[in-house]
Image (tube, rainbow, N blue to C red):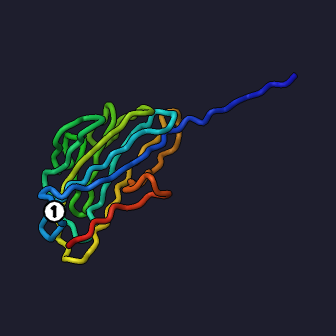
Amino acid sequence: GGFVTSVTNLAPSFSVTKSVKDLNGGAVVTGDILEFTIGGTNVGNDTAADVTITDFVGAGMKYDPGSLQITLGGGNGNKTDAVDNDEAEYVSNQKAAFWYVGQNAVPGFGGDVAPGESVEVKFRVQVTASSGQTLTNQAVLGAKGSAGGPHKDYLSDRDPQKVGTQPLDVQVD
């Protein structure tokens, strides 16, 4: 007889979504405040470690100071923009927001997200683009596997029903 060996590759995997809400409703126009929500669910079979979310504020948008939040999966609540003692920061010279999410996340280092668990963050921007322009935005969730899987980046997807990861586009009226 022989031996049959089965090797299961343990790895986290994320489904990352991104949505936008015009806080005053109606058409998106210059000067409006938009709130972006980024969510990630571990759909893999290993706990993710050092889970971070990064979002670069693109052309036609200006970060709304003091709007960083973690709403699910870690140190929930409002966060400061400064690189300090909480789990988020906005680095203006990079036009980038960073969150350190998951259980036991600390400033500068993400925590753990078990299979089936989710994280969610929010922030706001002011529209600076002119009428007829399109705002494009896509976030990145980064994580490594607790069982030794390498770090991997997962792009946000505005339409999980379509193949691939589509950035979120907002038309300015």
Instruction: Using the image as rendered, state which of residue 49 and residue 59 is in the foreground.
Output: 59
Kindly give the residue lying farthest to the right in the view shown.
Answer: 1
Q: Is residue 24 left or right of residue 172?
A: left
Residue 141 at x, y percent in the picture:
38, 49
- The crowd level at tag 1 (other Cα within 10 Å; few <14, some 14-19, many 20+) is few
Q: Is residue 76 left or right of residue 139?
A: left
- The quarter holding residue 52 reads top left
Q: Position of residue 111 (x, y in %)?
A: 35, 36
Query: Along the line of sight, which residue is nearer the eye, 150 or 156?
Result: 156
Q: Say if 28 sits above or below 117 in the image.
A: below
Question: Residue reaching furthest top?
Answer: 1
Residue 108 found in image quarter: top left
Q: Residue at x 45, y 33 (%)?
A: 115
Q: At x 47% / y 46%, what residue is drawn?
A: 151
Quarter of the figure with the N terminus: top right
How many labels were placed on the picture? Answer: 1
What's the residue type where badge 1 is placed? Gly
User: Is label 1 in a helix, a strand or a loop?
Assistant: loop
Q: Quadrant of the C terminus?
A: bottom left
Residue of label 1: 26
